[in-house]
Image (spheres, helix red, strand yellow):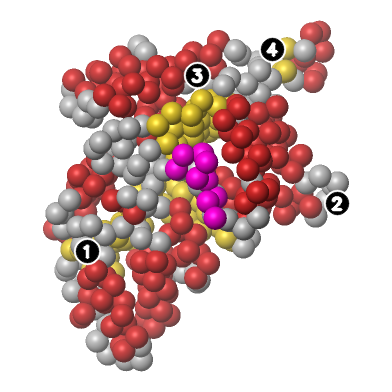
């Protein structure tokens, strides 16, 4: 990309790719500072033996913690920034997925008998990356809360720069969490090593995009797919940029299409495989909008898939996840015969409620 981030942003505003927003534009110089510093501070060799022992990491550039309400454009700004940084040692990842990977790596490290399992995990990350761009930093798991402070201290000390978005001001992370006083040094660490900025836009762009929009399409077919494709492109700005891989109790759950909190999968991808409540809860915790394609008629012939679908809807409902889907029929007519029809009445009711224009975390946090 040519030009500064502000120039790129203005170009895209001019050609209609995005809508100009004063609050978004005001953040761009902060991101440009980080971009230029990272590109200028390339790793330096350790003298004559540098070729043998590798490069010495450049000193970490002070990062950015960008917080604000849902749908204000934080993820879009993150994409614009991350894509423009001309270094190879960078990664953009959903914070929840990153912490799942860390927990899995810790589990593997402990099996080796190492005294401090977190140290090799942090060194492995820092050995590969100079920039970590996180989407949606939030801490809800006590296991994450107890290690994240030391982990980030190690990453910062090894020259890793962190840029993250969040729906919460740092002081509200892990709010009311178990043993929260042990977590407070991490909040101070974020303030010490990163600039904290609020994105104070008054516009919730995703809410605007879905306000009054149809989100349940039946029957599934060509017309339904075309309508959902349009919503998918509108919400993501062009489609998926990656898979979302979630590690759950040693298993990997993959959402094949993902971008900035919006995921898309077929019914059979999520309900045709032996997934359970923990998997669906992980999905509900990691995404804000789920597009689910081609829900079939349910009966005793696909009873296991139907049970998983009920569990999935319960997890999405409790997690306030916005659901957009295509289905063979209206909710009340999806499951009309066989064992489980009575229990499905609650699921049908929830599917109706979730169609409401004000449903889900998309309208607030």
Whether 170 is among the magenta residues is: yes
Q: Which residues are magenta?
A: 168-176
Residue 188 in picture, x, y percent from top left: 61, 34
Nearest the camera: 339 or 78? 78
Whether 201 is among the magenta residues is: no
Q: Which residue is mark 4?
A: 44
Q: Are marks 3 and 4 in contact (CB under 8 Å)?
A: no
Q: CA distance from mark 1 to mark 2?
A: 51 Å
Which residue corresponds to the image point at 70% horizontal and 26% vertical from the top-left?
A: 158
Residue 240 in picture, x, y percent from top left: 36, 43
* Among the two numbered marks 1 and 4 on one chain, the one whose residue lies closer to the N terminus: 4
Q: Which residue is mark 3?
A: 34
Task: Provide the secondary structure element on which disc 2 rests.
Answer: loop
**Classed neighbour count for the residue bearing mark 4: other residues with Cα under 10 Å, few (<14), some (14–19), many (≥20):** few
* Among the two numbered marks 2 and 4 on one chain, the one whose residue lies closer to the N terminus: 4
Task: Provide the secondary structure element on which disc 3 rests.
Answer: helix
Q: How many marks?
A: 4
Mark nearest the camera among 3 and 4 is 3
Question: In the displayed structure, does residue 335 sit left or right of residue 258?
Answer: left
Q: CA distance from mark 3 to mark 4?
A: 19 Å
Q: Are marks 2 and 3 in contact (CB under 8 Å)?
A: no
Nearest the camera: 115 or 299? 115
Q: Which residue is mark 2?
A: 113
Q: CA distance from mark 1 to mark 4?
A: 55 Å
Mark nearest the camera among 1 and 4 is 1
Which residue corresponds to the image point at 24% horizontal and 18% vertical from the top-left?
A: 11
* Among the two numbered marks 3 and 4 on one chain, the one whose residue lies closer to the N terminus: 3
For residue 355, the mark is 1
Q: Quadrant of residue 51?
A: top right
Q: CA distance from mark 2 to mark 3?
A: 38 Å
* Among the two numbered marks 1 and 2 on one chain, the one whose residue lies closer to the N terminus: 2
């Amino acid at each position: 990309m040519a030009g500064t981030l502000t120039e790129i942003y203005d170009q895209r505003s001019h050609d209609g790719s995005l809508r100009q927003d004063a609050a978004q534009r005001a953040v761009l110089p902060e991101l440009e500072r980080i971009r230029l510093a990272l590109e200028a501070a390339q790793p330096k060799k350790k003298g004559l033996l540098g070729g043998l022992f590798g490069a010495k990491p450049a000193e970490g550039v002070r990062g950015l913690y960008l917080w604000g309400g849902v749908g204000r454009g934080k993820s879009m700004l993150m994409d614009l920034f991350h894509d423009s940084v001309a270094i190879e040692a960078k990664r953009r990842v959903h914070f929840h997925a990153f912490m799942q990977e860390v927990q899995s790596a810790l589990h593997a490290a402990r099996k080796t008998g190492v005294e401090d399992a977190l140290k090799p995990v942090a060194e492995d990350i820092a050995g590969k990356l100079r920039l970590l761009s996180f989407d949606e930093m939030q801490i809800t798991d006590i296991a994450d809360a107890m290690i994240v402070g030391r982990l980030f201290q190690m990453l910062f000390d090894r020259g890793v720069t962190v840029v993250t978005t969040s729906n919460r001001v740092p002081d509200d992370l892990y709010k009311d969490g178990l043993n929260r006083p042990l977590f407070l040094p991490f909040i101070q660490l974020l303030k010490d090593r990163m600039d904290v900025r609020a994105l104070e836009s008054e516009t919730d762009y995703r809410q605007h995009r879905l306000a009054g929009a149809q989100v349940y399409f039946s029957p599934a077919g060509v017309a339904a797919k075309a309508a959902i494709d349009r919503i998918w492109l509108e919400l993501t700005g062009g489609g998926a940029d990656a898979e979302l891989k979630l590690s759950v109790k040693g298993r990997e759950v993959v959402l094949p299409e993902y971008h900035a909190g919006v995921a898309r999968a077929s019914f059979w991808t999520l309900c045709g495989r032996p997934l359970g409540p923990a998997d669906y809860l992980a999905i509900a915790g990691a995404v804000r909008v789920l597009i689910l394609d081609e829900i079939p008629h349910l009966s005793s012939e696909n009873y296991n898939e139907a049970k998983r679908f009920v569990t999935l809807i319960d997890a999405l409902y409790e997690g306030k996840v916005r659901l957009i889907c295509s289905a063979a029929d209206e909710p009340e007519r999806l499951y009309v015969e066989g064992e489980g029809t009575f229990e499905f009445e609650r699921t049908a009711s929830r599917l109706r409620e979730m169609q409401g224009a004000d449903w889900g975390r998309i309208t607030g946090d």
